[in-house]
Image (tube, rainbow, N blue to C red):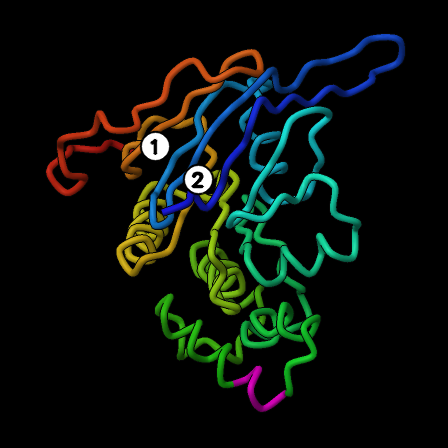
């Protein structure tokens, strides 16, 4: 089976005044369908740039990127936006919820961009909120929800279109340890249901939830545990 994500000799260079900053250097990665992968590294290592390229929020300077077998690095912006909405769900450290909209309305937002009818939007949003354990909070505003509940709303919004790929950038950075555990267990449940999940983190405790860890330093992959993991997540002692 073709990988869902394939990066081939990918580099990203930012121009900062008179200086070229190499965020990524000749990175090649394949992510298989249904994997749960953690991307680790210190600040400035290239992990978030990699996630942004995978999520089509940024373009590589050189190299190729294939998503679900489709070359995407040269697509025009309108085609990229459509691709993101169909195939990718995003979860961020800042929940990015609209403060005056209910949980249900926030979850409906990606479907608004797709032109889905309101009755169908409501049904799908309620189903997504049920998947994350918040069916009874559908009518609540973000400020009426805890931090963990707000993050679960953002996860429901990310999965409402049944994306092929769920990308999470430091999704527990604003949460306490107990809520972090709940959110990561939810990601594990979605992965168990067949979703491909990629989590960017600097925290080894978060990375331990994944079945594969890719570690970056100075814009290159310095370690990839693909095929090395032999101990099930449930038997590991993870301190958060």
Give whichever of discs 1 and 2 has the lower sequence position. Answer: 2
Measured from the top left, where is residue 20 in percent x and y? 78, 11
Q: CA distance from mark 1 to mark 2?
A: 8 Å
In the displayed structure, 94 sits above or below 49; it is below
| Magenta segment includes 188 | no
Measured from the top left, where is residue 1 in percent x and y? 36, 47
Q: Which residue is mark 1?
A: 207
Q: Which mark is residue 28?
A: none
Q: Which residue is mark 2?
A: 199
Measured from the top left, where is residue 203 in percent x and y? 39, 28
Location of the C terminus by quadrant is top left
Q: Residue furthest right?
A: 17
Of 10 and 102, which appears nearest the observer? 10
Of 13 and 103, which appears nearest the observer? 13
Measured from the top left, where is residue 60 in percent x and y? 69, 30
In-image side of 59 versus 240 (left or right): right
Q: Residue at x 60, y 36 (%)?
A: 65
Discs 1, 2 touching: Cβ within 8 Å: yes
The residues colored magenta run 118-122
Q: Residue at x 63, y 43 (%)?
A: 71
């Amino acid at each position: 089976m073709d990988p869902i994500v394939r990066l081939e000799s990918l580099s990203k260079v930012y121009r900062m005044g008179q200086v070229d900053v190499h965020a990524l250097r000749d990175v090649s990665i394949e992510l298989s369908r249904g994997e749960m992968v953690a991307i680790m590294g210190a600040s400035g290592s290239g992990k978030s740039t990699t996630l942004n390229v995978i999520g089509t929020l940024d373009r590589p300077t050189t190299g190729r990127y294939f998503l679900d077998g489709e070359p995407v690095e040269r697509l025009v912006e309108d085609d990229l936006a459509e691709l993101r909405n169909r195939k990718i769900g995003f979860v961020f450290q800042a929940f990015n919820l609209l403060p005056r909209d209910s949980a249900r309305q926030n979850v409906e937002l990606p479907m608004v961009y797709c032109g889905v009818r309101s009755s169908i939007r409501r049904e799908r949003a309620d189903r997504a909120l049920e998947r994350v354990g918040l069916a009874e909070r559908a009518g609540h505003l973000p400020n009426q929800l805890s931090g963990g509940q707000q993050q679960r709303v953002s996860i429901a919004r990310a999965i409402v279109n049944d994306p092929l790929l769920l990308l999470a950038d430091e999704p527990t950075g604003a949460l306490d340890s107990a809520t972090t555990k709940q959110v990561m267990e939810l990601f594990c449940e979605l992965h168990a249901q067949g979703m491909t999940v990629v989590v960017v983190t600097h925290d080894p405790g978060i990375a331990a939830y994944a079945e594969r860890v890719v570690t970056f330093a100075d814009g290159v992959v310095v370690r990839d545990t693909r095929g090395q993991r032999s101990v099930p997540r449930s038997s590991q002692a993870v301190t958060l």
